């Protein structure tokens, strides 16, 4: 059976994507760019940014550590100067520093929370005033099944992603009166993090997915596109699983 693809039109829209130099973030940014948007791509790794996006039109590149609030605020101001505003913000940046809890170091704990949770906060705090001024906006955060169910060796990652879920719901309530929605997706895709999983553990994880496979990173982008679209104007505060049924 062939299912037709429908891509919303984001012509004239400005979309900010963090962690957009590779993986899911790159695919999300590419999706919006293909749909006509101006895309501001933020990533910690300038070399990867340039390799992925250098020379592409309608793209603004910024190498920034999302855990640095001042740097994020400055980057957002620069993006608004470039594009005139920010219509959609996608908080995707993330890292993993896995270890069982009694072996976790302060750095492993702090760095994961800083990038995922504080990074999401920093970007959201910086874009909301511009969205309020415009009377509209979409904020879409990337969380995880681990943030809802936990995972051995990932208490730091689970805490960060669980925090994003709670943050998403709280922000959704705060900004709704300004015409802004805030939602999240919970993906299950082949990424660099998944590639680092030992083969026997990866086989177990794949077997637990009702659809029998990990998605391609590109399969996450349409869900983000829907939440950013006019069709999702009455959707806010939700966590949309895009996970092949693993969270059922």
Image (cartoon, rainbow, N blue to C red):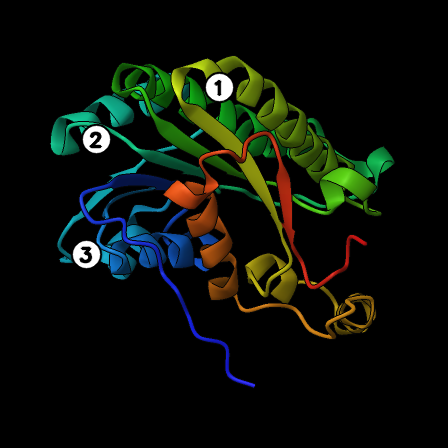
Q: Left or right: where does residue 183 sit relative to residue 36?
A: right
**Quadrant housing the N terminus:** bottom right
Residue hosting label 1: 176
Q: CA distance from mark 3 to mark 2?
A: 17 Å
Q: Are marks 2 and 1 in contact (CB under 8 Å)?
A: no
How many neighbours does mark 1 have within 10 angstroms: few (below 14), some (14-19), or many (20 or more)? some
Q: Left or right: where does residue 98 sit relative to residue 123?
A: right
Is residue 206 shown above or below 153?
A: below
- Residue 43 visible in the current orientation: no
Residue hosting label 3: 54
How many neighbours does mark 3 have within 10 angstroms: few (below 14), some (14-19), or many (20 or more)? few
User: Which residue is located at x 16 percent, y 58 percent?
Assistant: 56
Q: Secondary structure at mark 3?
A: loop
Residue hosting label 2: 79
How many neighbours does mark 2 have within 10 angstroms: few (below 14), some (14-19), or many (20 or more)? many
Is residue 122 shown above or below 148?
A: above
User: Which residue is located at x 62 percent, y 24 percent?
Assistant: 169
Residue 123 in the image: state x and y as whole percent.
41, 26
User: Which residue is located at x 28 percent, y 26 percent?
Assistant: 76
In this orientation, which residue lies closer to the viewer: 197 or 246?
246
- Residue 95 visible in the current orientation: yes
Q: CA distance from mark 1 to mark 3?
A: 36 Å
Q: Nearer the viewer, mark 3 or mark 2?
A: 2
Q: Secondary structure at mark 2?
A: helix
Q: Left or right: where does residue 158 sit relative to residue 127?
A: right
Residue 113 in the image: state x and y as whole percent.
62, 29
Precedes in sequence: disc 2 or disc 1:
2
Residue 6 in which image quadrant: bottom left
């Amino acid at each position: 059976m062939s299912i037709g693809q429908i891509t919303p039109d984001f012509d004239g829209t400005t979309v900010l994507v963090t962690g957009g130099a590779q993986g899911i973030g790159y695919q999300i940014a590419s999706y919006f760019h293909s749909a006509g948007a101006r895309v501001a791509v933020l990533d910690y790794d300038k070399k990867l940014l340039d390799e992925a996006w250098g020379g592409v039109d309608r793209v603004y590149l910024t190498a920034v550590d999302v855990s640095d609030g001042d740097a994020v605020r400055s980057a957002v101001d620069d993006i608004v100067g470039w594009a005139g505003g920010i219509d959609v913000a996608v908080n995707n940046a993330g890292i993993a520093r896995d270890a069982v809890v009694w072996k976790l170091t302060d750095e492993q704990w702090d760095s994961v929370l800083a990038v995922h949770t504080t990074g999401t906060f920093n970007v959201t705090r910086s874009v909301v005033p511009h969205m309020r001024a415009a009377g509209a906006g979409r904020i879409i955060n990337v969380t995880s099944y681990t943030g809802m169910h936990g995972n051995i060796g990932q208490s730091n990652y689970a805490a960060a992603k669980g925090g994003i879920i709670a943050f998403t719901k709280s922000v959704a309530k705060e900004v709704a009166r300004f015409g802004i929605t805030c939602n999240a997706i919970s993906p299950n895709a082949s990424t660099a993090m998944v590639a680092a999983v030992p083969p026997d553990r990866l086989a177990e994880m794949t077997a637990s997915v009702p659809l029998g496979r990990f998605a391609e990173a590109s399969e996450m982008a349409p869900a983000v596109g829907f939440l950013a679209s006019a069709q999702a104007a009455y959707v806010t505060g939700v966590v949309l699983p895009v996970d092949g049924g693993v969270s059922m």
